[in-house]
Image (cartoon, rainbow, N blue to C red):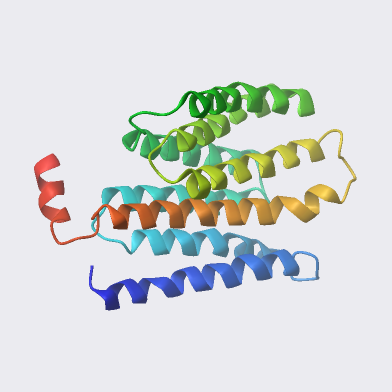
């Protein structure tokens, strides 16, 4: 990819950071409801635009879909919680597909153990926090996303860590429904863990795909052959 084209995509990330960080501050103020909802969705939506701009990579567009569903979920949670959860559920399925397309060939025993612990532990913790079957069912997709990210060939300390931050953010939401109801801790930590988790995931995937030549001039030829 020409250097100029790469530079032209970075403003999406800068705008995302501005929107994401400023939303966390604005949420504690008196911004009218509709504007605040749109503001909330803007941070991850701009990440989706950043990923989508990396044409013609199918995997870049898949992570863009994950981010877009996350942005939709962010906004829907404010007006219809269940619909927001469905958007995130679909996003987790899309992320699992991406990570399975990039499986690590020889994961270590500790990496496998961490993935299994995540896959089993997250739904169990979610159930213990809420005693809600629908929450535990959603947590299966959340755990699958994080476990497959950890076992993927994407960098664990960017994409894997970002996925785990997403998990902690959601567990704090569930804790706010139960043992931490009324506590200020979830309110302080949920958004930064979630937003910067998504940021690490998106930039980690795109950076890795770039390093593998996904955005080179040969990619359209490879896509045509695969199609």
Q: In this rendering, does residue 75 appear at all?
A: no
Q: Residue at x 43, y 35 (%)?
A: 96
Q: Is residue 116 above or below residue 34?
A: above
**In the depicted view, which residue is nearer to us: 19 or 77?**
19
Task: State the quadrant of the C terminus.
Answer: top left
Classify the position of the N terminus by image quarter. Answer: bottom left
Q: Position of residue 144 (x, y in %)?
A: 51, 29
Q: Does residue 191 appear to the left or right of 110 in the view shown? A: right
Which residue is rendered at x = 90% and y = 45% of the image?
182
Q: Is residue 97 visible?
A: yes
Q: What is the x, y in percent for residue 201?
A: 49, 50
Q: Is residue 91 above or below residue 126?
A: below
Dividing the picture into quadrants, the one containing residue 55 is: bottom left
Residue 63 higher or lower than 215, as above or below: above
Residue 178 on image: x %, y %: 84, 33
Tell me where residue 159 appears, x and y as whole percent.
48, 47
Instruction: Pick out the residue farthest to the right.
Output: 182
Q: Quadrant of residue 29?
A: bottom right
Residue at point 53% right, 49% down?
70
């Amino acid at each position: 990819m020409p250097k100029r084209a790469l530079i032209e995509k970075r403003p999406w990330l800068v705008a995302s950071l501005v929107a994401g960080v400023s939303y966390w501050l604005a949420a504690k103020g008196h911004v009218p409801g509709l504007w605040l909802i749109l503001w909330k969705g803007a941070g991850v939506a701009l990440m989706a635009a950043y990923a989508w701009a990396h044409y013609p990579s199918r995997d870049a567009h898949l992570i863009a879909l994950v981010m877009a569903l996350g942005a939709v979920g962010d906004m829907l949670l404010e007006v219809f919680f269940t619909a927001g959860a469905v958007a995130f559920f679909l996003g987790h399925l899309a992320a699992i597909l991406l990570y399975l397309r990039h499986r690590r060939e020889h994961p270590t025993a500790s990496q496998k153990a961490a993935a299994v612990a995540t896959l089993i532990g997250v739904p169990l913790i979610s159930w213990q926090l809420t005693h809600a079957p629908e929450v535990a069912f959603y947590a299966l997709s959340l755990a699958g996303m994080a476990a497959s990210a950890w076992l993927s060939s994407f960098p664990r300390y960017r994409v894997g860590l970002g996925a785990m931050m997403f998990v902690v953010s959601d567990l704090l939401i569930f804790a706010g429904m139960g043992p931490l109801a009324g506590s200020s801790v979830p309110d302080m930590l949920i958004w930064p863990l979630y937003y910067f988790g998504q940021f690490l995931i998106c930039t980690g995937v795109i950076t890795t795909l770039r390093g593998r030549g996904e955005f080179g001039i040969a990619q359209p030829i490879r896509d045509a052959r695969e199609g």
